[in-house]
Image (tube, grey):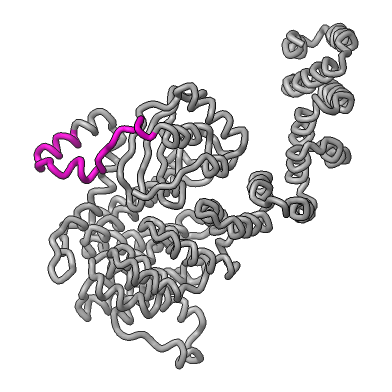
Amino acid sequence: MNVQLTEKIIRSRASEQSFQKGLAYYESDAIYNPARQPAPGGVTLTAHCEGSSAPSYRLWVELDGGGVRSASCTCPYDWGGDCKHIVALLLMYLHQPDGFSEQKSVSDLLAGLEKEALVALIVRLVERVPDLYDALELAIPAAQVSSQPKSAGKPERRQTQVSEGTYRKQITRILKQGYRGDYDDDWNEPGYIADLQEILETGVKFLDAGDAEGALIILRVLLEELTEDYDSDMDYNGDLACIIQDIGVPLAEAILSLELEPDTREELQGAMQNILDDLDEMIEADGELELILAALEHGWDELPDEETEWDEYEEDYWMTLDKLKQARLNVLARQGDDDAFLQMAEKMDPKRYALKLLDLGRVDEAIKASEKLENTSDIFEVAQRLREFGRLREVIALAERGLELKGYDTFQLALWLAPLEESQGRIDMALLAYRTVYEGSPSIEVYRHLKRLAGGNWPSLRLALIQKAGNNRDVLVDIHLEEGDWDAAIEAVKHDMWSFQLLEKVAEAVIPHRPGWVIRVALKQSDGLIARAQSKLYPVAARWLERAKRAYRQKGRDAEWRAYIDNLRMTYARRPALQREIKDL
């Protein structure tokens, strides 16, 4: 397996603080149960790490020839870059790869089990972890359709007896209870909406399992019941409107999946048209419901030519036909008709065409097809998928083209591409990618990456980055503190003394360097908070007083501090809440 990992790569993915803490975790043997197993184009690492707010955290990392493909940890860290636990795991794999046990992939692990043994194993697991039952229930329909034998490239149709009357009664009951307020309502979403959403998801599960007849019954009944007496004034937050919108695509795909008799198609078309007419302009669901009508009208017939017939139809009509084309592709994908899918996707959706080729392992063809991708988002999605095949040179070339387009998702693409470029020694392109990220969203993390890579060009680049930060006071302060420019950091917050979080950050950082300023600011802040006589503000005041104490000590003025705090205790002797907060100062 071609895996690249260096300390430089690990450092580039984390803040300096996270790296140092991760190094300490690694050196203290906080990582345990480390294991690795083969993955497409690389290796997957798993482990546990001792935690501070939990007994342990679960780690998962994917490596390939471009470095770290992805990484996750169950800890709550969310401050940008890898957490200290991931850093510790990567350092362990870098320095002690033999300490990782070899694991088979899950498919290899289960391959030798007979059906009875596999069922018994799953039963035992569910008994130990009851929450697995819900995951199994959701996964079974998709597993059934994927495991069905294929005939001429298509799975056998699955049929289940679905009672229209049962679903209609259930939906009616839910709506009545919802309108009566029998459910405990959530602030954003009433409880009965979740029940209706579950019925919608059931219809989609039937569709995914190859039972289009069952899906059609469930989705049609749901749509009819929701729209029969729909009142937008009662739908305060638009929750029902959202469900009505969401029915459109799967119902259209169910129709496309069936060979409906002419009478049945005509009856359904009339019913859907009546629903659309009744709703009128009460909700913005026309586009999705029009998709149902388009599926009934056109089916799999040839569609109007947009280039030659554009003026004959409204613009919304062409948008609906574009959705119909996507729905057709979804049906072909669900049916496993790869040849028909590729034939259609090649003409209308280069991204889905390239992704399907990759699914089929036809990598060279996918790379060729990706040349037709015309927007950053599509390029980013295909590049991520292509990376799994280890074709890093082609991945980088594709991503760099996406970067040049400067479209939607440019920021995310550049952030993903930069460490990949660096891992391949392409420093100039890594700089360009990080610069693109910074231009879109300045941050201290990206500033550090640029500083690390810029070399002799850093002085001029630094000025440009500071200028780009503009009025983003948070980033400017972070930069000044990063560079040890204490006076500039103080100046940045001097006229914004009520931006407490920023002021605290600067005061905390400059205690060893500008203790006099910290004393003045800390006492001013604490005095103001205490004067408001609100006990909830006393812990904040105490934090400022603690900073003042350290600043006094930094200047060797311990006696002045003791006199100040003693006088404070005497002045507010009748405030027990304040006395509790400052008793240890």
Residue 407 sits in quarter = bottom right
Report the side of 376 relative to 198 (left or right).
right
- On screen, 148 above or below 270? above
Report the side of 459 relative to 388 (left or right).
right
Residue 246 sits in quarter = bottom left
Q: Please tell me how many numbered marks the rendered image carries.
A: 0
User: Residue 221 versus residue 518: which sits nearer the camera?
Assistant: 518
User: Residue 144 versus residue 296: which sits nearer the camera?
Assistant: 144
- On screen, 440 above or below 344? above
| Residue drawn at x 28%, y 52% as measured from the top left | 169
| Quadrant holding the C terminus | top right
Report the side of 370 relative to 297 (left or right).
right
Residue range highlighted in magenta: 97-123
Quick check: can you spot residue 411?
Answer: no
| Residue drawn at x 50%, y 84% as measured from the top left | 314
| Residue drawn at x 11%, y 37% as measured from the top left | 117
Task: Residue at the far bottom: name it.
Answer: 308
- Residue 584 in the image: state x and y as whole percent: 73, 9
- Residue 24 in the image: state x and y as whole percent: 54, 25
- Residue 139 in the image: state x and y as whole percent: 27, 48
- Residue 561 in the image: state x and y as whole percent: 86, 12
User: Residue 64 versus residue 222: which sits nearer the camera?
Assistant: 64
Residue 191 sits in quarter = top left
Quick check: can you spot residue 167?
Answer: yes
- On screen, 344 above or below 61? below
Give the main secondary structure, helix, strand or loop, of the magenta stretch: helix
User: Residue 348 versus residue 309: which sits nearer the camera?
Assistant: 348
- On screen, 524 above or below 181? above
